Amino acid sequence: MSQIFSLDDVRTRLKGVDSGSVGILPLEFRDVSLSVGANQLLDRLNFRIDPATFTVILGPNGCGKTLTLKLAHGLIVPSSGEIAWNGPYGKAAKRYQAMVFQRPVMLRRSVRANVEYALKLRRIPRRERHEIVGEALALAGLDRFAKRPARWLSIGEQQRVAIARAWVTRPQVLFLDEPTANLDPSATRAIEELLLRVHQAGTKVVMTTHDMAQARRMSDDVLFLCRGCSVEHAPSDEFFAAPRSVDARAFIEGRLVW
């Protein structure tokens, strides 16, 4: 006989760590480098990602923003250095995080089924999945699209489905790689509002962007990368008002950084 869970039991199971326990943050990069052959892509990254804040990773194209997210999420391994998650759950940190890529990938099924798929992978009982998926669709403003084939939606709407699918498992950390790239202002605003709701619901958000105005709107703290190095990490008001590095000042002023 299969075990029957209450909805509260399921939510606790999805969170992975009880509210009274220590979570997987902070995340620390300690002298993390990444090389492919003779090409050094990242050079001794050192920074710490703390809980609670909304973190934005900024930097010029090719500086290593996406690679940094992939390293943090465990999709690639560093050539040297250490990536350390906190606490007793740190060794299984990937279970308590999720990542959304710049180009959303939709399964050939409805919006609801796309979101529900993440719960199926966690073996959440069917009777519990319906309400949890409903909460995620409501959070993302996708209720009216629930039965529509996900691939029929606009790219901005598909991105919201991808975020809802990632959030439905209640990750402690959500990584996003330029989630509003090439979207119009209306779609961008919808995604920004969704991410703020996700953050307010208790998930740590770490997001890359090339949009300076978006970084000012969304971030509590900014990690600035340049030439594959972690140049500066500071609270947003400090970073935008008085960046400490020459490269960060040039980037904020719109000057070319090589």
Image (tube, grey):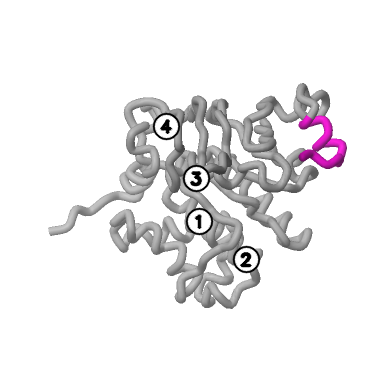
Mark 4: amino acid: Ile
- Between label 1 and label 4, give the one nearer the viewer: 4
Q: From what the image shows, is residue 92 above or below residue 183? A: above
User: In percent of the image, x 45 and y 37: which residue is there?
Assistant: 79
Whole-percent x, y for residue 247 in the image: 77, 31
Query: Badge 1: how crowded within 10 Å, few (<14), some, or many (20+)?
Result: many
Mark 3: amino acid: Gly
Image mark for residue 157: 2
Secondary structure at badge 1 equals helix
Whole-percent x, y for residue 50 in the image: 54, 27
Q: Which residue is mark 4?
A: 24
User: In percent of the image, x 44 and y 45: which residue is there?
Assistant: 76
Query: Badge 3: how crowded within 10 Å, few (<14), some, or many (20+)?
Result: few
- Residue 228 vs residue 82: left or right? right
Q: Residue furthest front?
A: 38
Q: Which residue is mark 3?
A: 37
- Of label 1 and label 3, which has the lower sequence position? 3
- Of label 4 and label 2, which has the lower sequence position? 4
What segment carries the magenta color? 247-258
The image quarter in which residue 55 lies: top right
- Of label 2 and label 3, which has the lower sequence position? 3
Marks 4/3: CA–CA distance: 32 Å
Mark 1: amino acid: Ala
Query: The C terminus lies in which quarter of the figure?
Result: top right
Q: Is residue 141 magenta?
A: no
Secondary structure at badge 2 equals helix
Marks 2/3: CA–CA distance: 39 Å
